[in-house]
């Protein structure tokens, strides 16, 4: 089922570059691939520079011009929000990292930069407590307000395997920032499952803050050690992408829908009490919704309509699944035949 005609003017549908990472495409070749496959643009999580080129202003201007000529949108990554190296615990100068990413975005004519600092901290007992990370983030990000504002760029924190939407809202409060200012959210619709959140409920919570997207479908299954979440072809999973896109259509800005897809699976050890205690905002209603989605996922897997693709198999299927995902998202967003 597709959304109504109102959404036709609102949404362009493209991909995140991570989806085709196994192809090692240079940026111009990636734009060509997306154009040929019926997409409208690219969110660059990483940049495979062509031989002899540097990621300088000349290259960025060339990339921006080429995208305009092909009538494709560009989105940019490279931001960070946790001021620590999560492997070593050493401080990281994310002010410098984010200034560089924001300056690149400014040259490209882009007003948001995706930020992702790692993830799965709660899965190891030796990681800093979430409260400690949030406090350090608030102090670091508050100091970046003027820099990001002067460059006209919003740092879009991805809903990754780092923080729940409840915690990100508390971060924004601690920073004294409101929607439309220098901090926002890149909404990854499937990662919400891994952080024990119902994707629709979580989208409603942070909707005014969403400035970028990773439209990613998925499933979640009950297993011996807890729950297992995994990505699937967009439009084939249990995430209500139609309702999420309908919610995004209520925003007062034209927001691209950037498909992200990949292989792999994530164990969520909810039967471990110490792990579950790290999600204090998980309510009975939220857990009930997750179990309902797990029941639905199990039915789809049993029928053969959905399956986990291991990461080492992703290179074999990525092009086909991304093309299919683009078509499915365009259909859901009312873009058939465009």
Image (tube, rainbow, N blue to C red):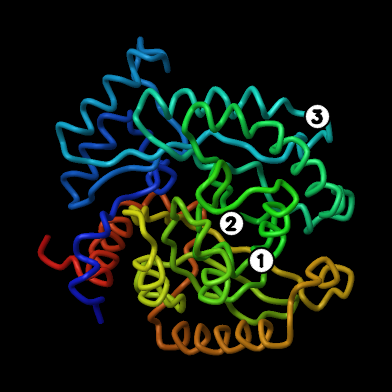
Mark 2 crowd level (few <14, some 14–19, many ≥20, 10 Å Cα)? many
Q: State left or right for residue 71 relative to residue 272.
A: left
Distance of label 1 from label 3 (alpha carbons): 25 Å
Q: Read off the residue under disc 3.
A: 91
Among the 4 quarters of the image, the one containing residue 62: top left
Q: Residue at x 38, y 35 (%)?
A: 110
Q: Read off the residue under disc 2.
A: 159
Task: Please tell me which of labels 1 and 2 falls first in the chain.
Answer: 2
Q: For marks 1 and 2, give the one nearer the viewer.
A: 2
Q: Residue at x 49, y 68 (%)?
A: 308
Among the 4 quarters of the image, the one containing residue 257: bottom left
Query: Which of the pair 204/88 is nearer the observer?
Result: 204
- Residue 153, percent across and down? 48, 35
Q: Is residue 203 above or below residue 37?
A: below
Query: Which of the pair 274/334 is nearer the observer?
Result: 334
Marks 1 and 2 in Cβ contact (< 8 Å)? yes
Rendered-image quadrant of the N terminus: bottom left
Q: Which mark is residue 195?
A: 1
- Residue 285, percent across and down? 67, 87
């Amino acid at each position: 089922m597709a959304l109504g005609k109102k959404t036709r003017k609102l949404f362009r549908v493209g991909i995140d570059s991570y989806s085709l990472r196994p192809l090692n495409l240079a940026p111009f070749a990636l734009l060509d691939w997306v154009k040929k496959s019926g997409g409208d643009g690219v969110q660059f999580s990483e940049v495979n520079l062509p031989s002899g080129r540097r990621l300088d202003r000349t290259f960025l201007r060339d990339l921006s011009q080429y995208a305009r000529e092909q009538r494709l949108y560009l989105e940019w990554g490279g931001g960070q929000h946790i001021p620590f190296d999560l492997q070593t615990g050493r401080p990281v100068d994310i002010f410098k990292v984010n200034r560089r990413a924001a300056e690149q975005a400014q040259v490209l004519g882009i007003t948001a930069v995706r930020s992702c600092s790692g993830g799965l901290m709660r899965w190891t007992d030796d990681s800093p407590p979430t409260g400690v990370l949030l406090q350090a983030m608030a102090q670091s990000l508050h100091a970046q307000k003027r820099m990001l504002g002067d460059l006209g760029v919003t740092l879009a924190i991805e809903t990754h395997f780092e923080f729940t939407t409840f915690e990100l809202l508390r971060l924004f409060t601690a920073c004294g920032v409101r929607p439309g200012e220098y901090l926002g959210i890149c909404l990854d619709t499937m990662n919400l499952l891994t952080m024990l959140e119902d994707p629709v409920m979580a989208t409603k919570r942070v909707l005014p803050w969403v400035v970028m997207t990773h439209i990613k479908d998925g499933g979640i299954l009950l297993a011996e050690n807890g729950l297992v979440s995994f990505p699937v072809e967009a439009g084939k999973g249990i995430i209500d992408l139609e309702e999420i896109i309908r919610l995004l259509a209520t925003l007062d800005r034209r927001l691209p829908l950037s498909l992200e897809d990949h292989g792999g699976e994530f164990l969520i050890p909810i039967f471990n009490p110490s792990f579950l205690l790290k999600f204090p905002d998980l309510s009975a209603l939220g857990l009930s919704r997750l179990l309902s989605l797990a029941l639905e996922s199990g039915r789809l897997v049993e029928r053969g309509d959905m399956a986990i693709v291991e990461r080492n198999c992703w290179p074999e299927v990525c092009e086909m699944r991304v093309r299919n995902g683009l078509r499915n998202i365009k259909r859901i967003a009312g873009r058939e035949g465009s």
